[in-house]
Amino acid sequence: MIFLSWNCRGLASKPKKLALKELVSCYNPDIIFLQETLGRSFEVESSLRISLPGWVFFAIDVVGHSGDVAIGVREGRMQIINHWGMAQVLSMEVFSPEFGFPLLIINIYGPCQGRESF
């Protein structure tokens, strides 16, 4: 199983969407984690479904500078059991025949909110 995680810093531009398509084509992931999409959850989900047919995406709005995280799974490779999110966490429980048991995947994003930089 291949996971792709990308802090994309915005997905509205055509070059970013093309870069995501190229990453998916090159690495053929089963699951995609995206952070800092700079969009509202419903817009991000809709745009990703159009850009990457054959994928199911869920997103949540994150409070902070760069907002929104998303998780996508390739249709047919696993079954989505449940998904939920809150604040800066988006989780999905999937069943993969490859493992034979449910797998919990979590995408966490901690936006900068006046904290001391690392």
Image (tube, rainbow, N blue to C red):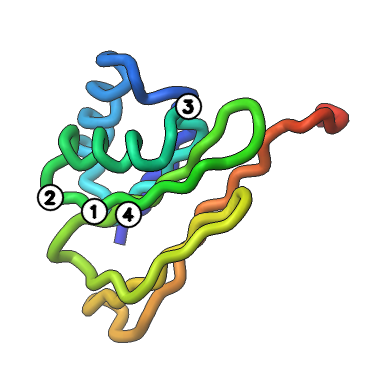
The number of numbered discs placed on residues in the rendered structure image is 4
**Contact flag, marks 1 and 4 (Cβ < 8 Å):** no
Instruction: Pinpoint residue 60: horizontal percent, then vertical percent.
Output: 47, 47
In which quadrant of the rendered view does residue 12 lie? top left
Front disc: 3 or 4: 3
The mark that comes first in sequence, 1 or 4, is 4
If the image is split into quadrants, where does the C terminus sit?
A: top right
Q: Which residue is mark 3?
A: 38
Q: Is residue 58 left or right of residue 18?
A: right
Which mark, by number, is residue 31?
Answer: 4
Q: CA distance from mark 1 to mark 3?
A: 19 Å
Q: CA distance from mark 2 to mark 4?
A: 12 Å
Which type of secondary structure does the marked residue at label 3 adopt? loop
Q: Which residue is mark 2?
A: 54
Q: From the viewer's side, name the closer residue of 113 and 102.
A: 113
Check the image and report above or below for 23 versus 16. below
